[in-house]
Image: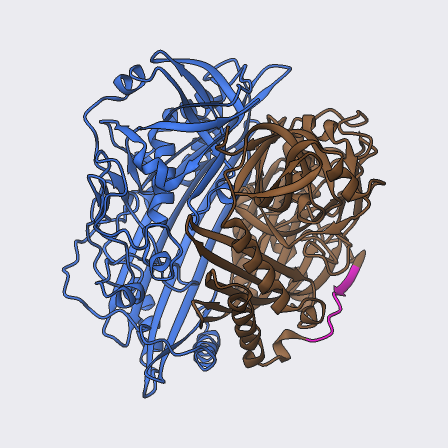
Chain colours: A brown, B blue
């Protein structure tokens, strides 16, 4: 993406006033999307964005500047601005170390979306529209979206790292509105992978569309969710949101080191039920949070965070690892070249257990079965977290009965983790997610088998 | 500087071929962000960004087909490719009889001065000092404040220009500066978070002490918070959270949701949908709002729109597309950045104030909860079905007095129900960083879910 000599001159300029660390992050993103709504292909969008972010660290201070101008004068000026921002740290002028790590990774894709005609992409949307409307008379509105993005990055730093990564991702989502006597209801399905157009060999858009339509239609008869503390059985797949919120964020070293996590200082302690082994794994091929190198040039890693209930490690980026005098864990990520990296999750999941999912439901006398989860949010300091249920049912006497309207559930991370009393043998990864933190969104994957939390607070209105 | 943005926009729009209509939005901004932590500057970011978005509409099959492309650079080859991409995309979209560019509608612009030269004159060292001062002020507000996660100062200066083949040409520039802090309070056994923020056109307009106090007070007053049993009670929202609620309601009154049948209010125009106490106005010509602007995202003059008048639904917000489709006039409510198509949204949504001061409102609540933060707004609020269920923290209200702190509960209702349940609007309007203006709101009954 850039001439090696120019990379070296840019880093030299960044280090000219003395610094502990300098880094050049170059990014080139090309995206295309098509959207259908209201029976019409109404949006075709192409985007391109290219630029560089330069980071200079002096002591505890990071200077950062970014530019869309990748010419030599543009990069050298940006390096100068970043260095000035970090101010003089008193260190001497350093030379860039000879390249110790020089590598380039590219995720293998079978069919480059750029080689597929727009007409073919548009046809997928029309198929989804027809399938959703044909699924049920009550379907009153359908929206569908196709998207592909290719993100190429180059990361070079004063520790001698020089790596590149090249990821192509393709995604598809469909949402339906159903209209009934009691009002409107919604249903949604979305898929996405680090993959090309072969995504559609794996997923049938008609099936996704019918799934979204059926979800919306089923909820037309839904009754208000109960209010109060109940046993909650969470279906495999998207149930991984629970762990992302209940403990994932609290295991990010930047929050831990600032005392903003309930898990600070608890390494080696039992923080969850022994049934829980939690892993964050950026190496899972094809998953939404996969990458070859993180946005600081560290190779993706599989990190066991909780092993049989015991907290084994936190997630780290470059700066937090430096503070703790250890190696980073491949969790330094950023939304774009306009953003500073920070500690982020990749694909977060818990290992499958031994229980038969049907038996978990049958063994629940009264509770809620959450078949599909929406997003969630956590207050890492108190550990309180919420997540949305977008498809849920009442469990009565061990059986799934009536559908419930949408709502949030609330719980406390450490308490909920400790209480988990059943983990199924039906592990699967869920839908593609976007995790937001401090104003930056990054793609993440989540997965879980069916599991039960004996007491969570269901945020409904029924007594 | 604005001149060359306008040149870029008009230069591209001028390349329209026969049967083609083009709109170009161009933006440029410079920004600074300083984050303080532990008495030191944690990071200092200095940045310049560019954006260009090209919308091409092609006449076809009795309507127009739309294509869009955006890019983050003004290089000549990038601009040419962006126009070509948009053109190419239009070839694959379906013709829409209501699609088209905004046409000049003769409404005179109420010019808003959104640029303050004092920002450019503000020295860099002072920006750093403000972030450090904010951290210190938050920490020292109470011994119960255990730490500050981050204290930030930020500012931006941006310019924007729009040109279209329909004869629209608009340009503007704006400055803003902000302070924000998030802190932790508590003891060995518990920790709570608090957040404070202020925004102004220039740093001199920022109230640092108030930001520190907002964050620290929020965190400190939650110490000792517990889950309470499920119950029905009165809900009180201070202006900041009331504005969040109004923004959700505002999104349900937007033309795109209306014409596509995605809001329960779609066919309620002219009917009573809320308590007679509620009058809701979106007025970007009100200079008190940080959302004030001269032109909307399609270059039409911003204007005052009354959405709900004493409980009656009077109007929806429209951009030119949704207006054409609904048989209405654009309310100049197109919102966009240079990298996105014009959507529809409120810019300066505000309630008409009530007659009773906040203290009096509180004193009138026998059994209620003052909610100070809500979580899970993206997962628990469905503006199509109207379902509303969010996590909440706050203080119980007993016999008109603030009582014990509460956490790990949810509050739930439906959005149409909440509008009807409004029983009081405070007398003091507060203008909030997001551009909206609100007073405290009191809702008669909400379901709290706890132990």
Look at the image and give the residue range highlighted in magenta.
A102-111
* Above or below, A374 relative to B320: above
Locate residue A357, reporting x and y percent.
Answer: 77, 43
Locate residue A198, reporting x and y percent.
Answer: 70, 72
**Residue B238 in which image quadrant:** top left
Locate residue B292, reporting x and y percent.
Answer: 26, 48
Locate residue A26, reporting x and y percent.
Answer: 62, 61
Q: Residue furthest right?
A: A354
**Is residue B428 left or right of A390 when viewed as pictured?**
left
Q: Residue at horizontal 69%, vertical 63%? A: A194
- Quadrant of the snapshot with the N terminus of chain A: bottom right
* Closer-to-camera residue (A392/B306): A392
Q: Residue at horizontal 28%, vertical 28%? A: B423
Is residue A353 highlighted in magenta?
A: no
Query: Could you tell me if residue A439 is visible in this image?
Result: yes
* Closer-to-camera residue (B411/B181): B411
Query: Could you tell me if residue B40 is visible in this image?
Result: no
Q: Residue at horizontal 59%, vertical 25%? A: A382
Q: Residue at horizontal 23%, vertical 52%? A: B315
**Is residue A265 left or right of A58 when viewed as pictured?**
right
* Above or below, B402 relative to A5: above
* Above or below, B421 relative to B104: above
């Amino acid at each position: 993406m850039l001439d090696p000599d120019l990379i070296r001159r840019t880093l030299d300029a960044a280090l000219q006033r003395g610094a502990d660390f300098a880094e050049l992050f170059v990014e080139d993103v090309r995206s295309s999307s098509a959207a259908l709504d209201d029976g019409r292909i109404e949006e075709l969008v192409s985007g391109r964005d290219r630029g560089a972010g330069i980071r200079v660290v002096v002591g505890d201070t990071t200077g950062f500047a970014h530019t869309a101008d990748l010419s030599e004068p543009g990069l050298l000026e940006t390096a100068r601005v970043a260095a000035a921002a970090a101010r003089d740290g008193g260190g001497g002028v350093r030379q860039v170390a000879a390249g110790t790590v020089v590598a380039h990774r590219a995720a293998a894709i079978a069919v480059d979306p750029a080689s597929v005609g727009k007409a073919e992409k548009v046809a997928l949307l029309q198929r989804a529209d027809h399938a959703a409307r044909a699924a049920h008379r009550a379907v009153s509105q359908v929206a569908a979206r196709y998207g592909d993005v290719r993100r190429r990055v180059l990361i070079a730093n004063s520790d001698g790292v020089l790596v590149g990564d090249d990821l192509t991702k393709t995604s598809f989502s469909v949402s339906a509105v159903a209209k009934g006597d009691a009002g409107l209801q919604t249903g949604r399905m979305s898929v996405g992978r680090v993959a090309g157009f072969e995504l559609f060999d794996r997923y049938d858009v008609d099936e996704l569309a019918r799934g979204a339509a059926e979800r919306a239609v089923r909820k037309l008869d839904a009754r208000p969710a109960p209010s109060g503390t109940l046993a909650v059985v969470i279906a495999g797949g998207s149930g991984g949101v629970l762990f992302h919120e209940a403990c994932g964020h609290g295991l990010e070293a930047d929050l831990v080191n600032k005392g903003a996590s309930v898990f600070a200082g608890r390494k080696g302690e039992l923080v969850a039920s022994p049934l829980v082994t939690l892993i964050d794994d950026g190496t899972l091929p094809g998953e939404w949070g996969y990458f070859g190198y993180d946005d600081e040039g560290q190779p993706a890693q599989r990190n066991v965070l909780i092993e049989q209930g015991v907290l084994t490690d936190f997630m780290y980026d470059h700066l937090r690892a430096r503070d703790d005098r250890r190696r980073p864990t491949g969790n330094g990520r950023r939304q774009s070249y306009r953003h500073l990296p920070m500690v982020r999750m990749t694909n977060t999941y818990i290992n499958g257990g031994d229980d038969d999912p049907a038996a978990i439901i049958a063994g629940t006398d009264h509770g809620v079965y959450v078949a599909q989860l929406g997003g969630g949010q956590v207050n890492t300091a108190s550990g309180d977290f919420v997540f949305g249920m977008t498809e849920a049912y009442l469990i009565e006497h061990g059986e799934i009965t009536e559908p419930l309207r949408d709502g949030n559930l609330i719980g406390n991370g450490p308490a909920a983790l400790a209480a988990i009393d059943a983990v199924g043998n039906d592990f699967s990864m869920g839908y593609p997610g976007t995790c937001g933190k401090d104003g930056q969104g990054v793609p993440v994957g989540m997965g879980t088998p069916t599991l039960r939390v004996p007491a969570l607070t269901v945020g409904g209105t029924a007594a | 500087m604005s001149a060359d943005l306008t040149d870029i926009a008009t230069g591209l729009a001028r390349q329209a071929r026969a049967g083609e209509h083009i709109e170009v939005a161009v933006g440029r901004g410079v920004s600074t962000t300083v984050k303080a932590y532990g008495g030191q500057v944690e990071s200092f970011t200095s940045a310049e960004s560019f954006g260009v978005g090209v919308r091409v509409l092609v006449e076809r099959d009795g309507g127009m087909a739309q294509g869009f492309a955006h890019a983050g650079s003004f290089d000549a080859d990038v601009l040419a490719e962006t126009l070509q991409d948009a053109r190419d995309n239009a070839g694959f979209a379906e013709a829409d009889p209501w699609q088209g560019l905004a046409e000049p509608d003769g409404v005179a612009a109420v010019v808003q001065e959104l640029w303050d030269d004092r920002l450019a004159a503000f020295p860099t060292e002072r920006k750093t000092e403000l972030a450090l001062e904010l951290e210190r002020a938050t920490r020292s507000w109470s011994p119960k404040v255990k730490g500050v996660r981050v204290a930030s100062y930020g500012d931006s200066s941006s310019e924007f220009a729009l040109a279209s083949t329909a004869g629209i040409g608009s340009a503007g520039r704006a400055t803003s500066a902000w302070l924000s802090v998030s802190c932790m309070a508590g003891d060995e056994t518990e920790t709570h978070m608090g957040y404070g923020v202020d925004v102004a056109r220039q740093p001199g307009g920022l109230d640092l002490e108030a930001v520190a106090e907002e964050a620290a007070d929020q965190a400190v007053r939650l110490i000792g918070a517990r889950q309470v049993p499920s119950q029905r009670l009165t809900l009180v929202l201070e202006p900041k959270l009331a504005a969040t609620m109004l923004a959700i309601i505002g999104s349900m009154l937007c033309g795109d949701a209306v014409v596509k049948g995605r809001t329960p209010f779609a066919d309620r125009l002219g009917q009573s949908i809320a308590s007679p106490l509620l009058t809701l106005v979106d007025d970007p010509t009100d200079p008190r709002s940080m959302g004030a602007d001269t032109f909307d995202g399609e270059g039409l003059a911003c204007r005052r729109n009354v959405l709900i008048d004493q409980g009656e639904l009077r109007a929806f917000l429209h951009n030119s597309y949704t207006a054409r489709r609904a048989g209405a006039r654009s309310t100049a409510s197109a919102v966009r950045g240079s990298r996105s198509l014009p959507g529809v949204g409120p810019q300066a949504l505000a309630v008409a104030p009530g007659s009773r001061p906040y203290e009096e409102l509180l004193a009138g609540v026998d059994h209620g909860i003052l909610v100070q933060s809500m979580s899970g707004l993206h997962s628990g609020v469905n503006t199509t079905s109207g379902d509303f269920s969010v996590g909440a923290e706050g203080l119980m209200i007993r016999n008109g007095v603030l009582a014990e702190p509460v956490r790990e509960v949810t509050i739930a209702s439906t959005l149409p129900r909440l509008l009807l349940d409004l029983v009081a609007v405070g007398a003091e309007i507060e203008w909030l960083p997001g551009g909206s203006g609100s007073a405290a709101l009191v809702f008669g009954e909400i379901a709290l879910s706890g132990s």
